[in-house]
Amino acid sequence: MAYQLFRRVFVLIFALFFRLEVQGRENIPMDGPFILCANHFSWWDPPLVGTLTKRFVRFMAKEELFKIPVLGKFFTIIQAFPVKRNTADRRAIRTALETLKNGHGLGIFPEGTRSRTNELLPPQAGVAMLAIKSKAPVVPIGIIGPYKLFRPVRVFIGTPLRFPEYYDVKVSGEQLNKIAQQIMQEIARLCQGNSEVNEH
């Protein structure tokens, strides 16, 4: 499978050039669907998240990236799928839910775009909607850089989050925003609780 081949390549890259250190890998479910949710400040973030588990993780990526010849081909090979940002992209939602229904992992960056300042951005409500509709556990991930050669990149994986009180009931936009904020707060806690590593 092409995905696993590319994953092994990136495992090697991160081990040799970025001294990847991971805590909490055991929090990623060994079976069943799951949603990996991480902060996003670098192009390196998606391949990094993909190395955290041997299980197949399908990523959402903004549709503009699929129009870049080489990059778009790469995304297609690893079965990533496009999403129209700032819209209710029903095709992307359907693909995401189908991925989870089939028992695979889904990779999402709740901020919806890269932070240019390393400060966390407000989350999009879409991640909450997927968590509620799929009932899949959400695994929060805090990535602490910098992505500089031969310097440590540290990743902290939190305990899976579930929201059973919202399953099988009608959920308002306000509630979806609240859930998304909860997810983002946990990502922030993972980053801030280990922020001292940025100083070394």
Image: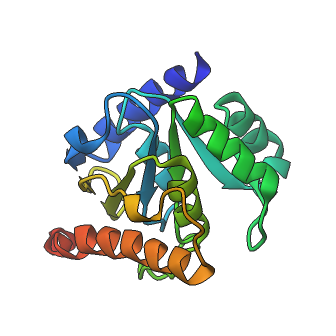
> Vertical placement of 171 versus 21: above or below?
below
Instruction: List x then y, in percent, for residue 199.
Output: 17, 75
Farthest residue to the top: give it.
1
- Image quarter in which the C terminus is found: bottom left
> Vertical placement of 130 versus 58: above or below?
below
**Front residue (pair 127, 176):** 176
**Front residue (pair 131, 77):** 131
Q: Report the residue at 47% width, 54% height from top.
A: 45
Instruction: List x then y, in percent, for residue 107.
Output: 52, 48
**Front residue (pair 104, 144):** 104
Farthest residue to the front: give it.
169
Q: Report the residue at 74% width, 68% height from top.
A: 85
Q: Viewed as shown, does residue 66 lie left or right of 56?
A: right
> Vertical placement of 50 versus 167: above or below?
above
Q: Viewed as shown, does residue 33 lie left or right of 2?
A: left
Q: Report the residue at 60% width, 68% height from top.
A: 170
- Image quarter in which the N terminus is found: top right
- Work out whether residue 44 can be spotted: no
Q: Report the residue at 47% width, 49% height from top.
A: 135
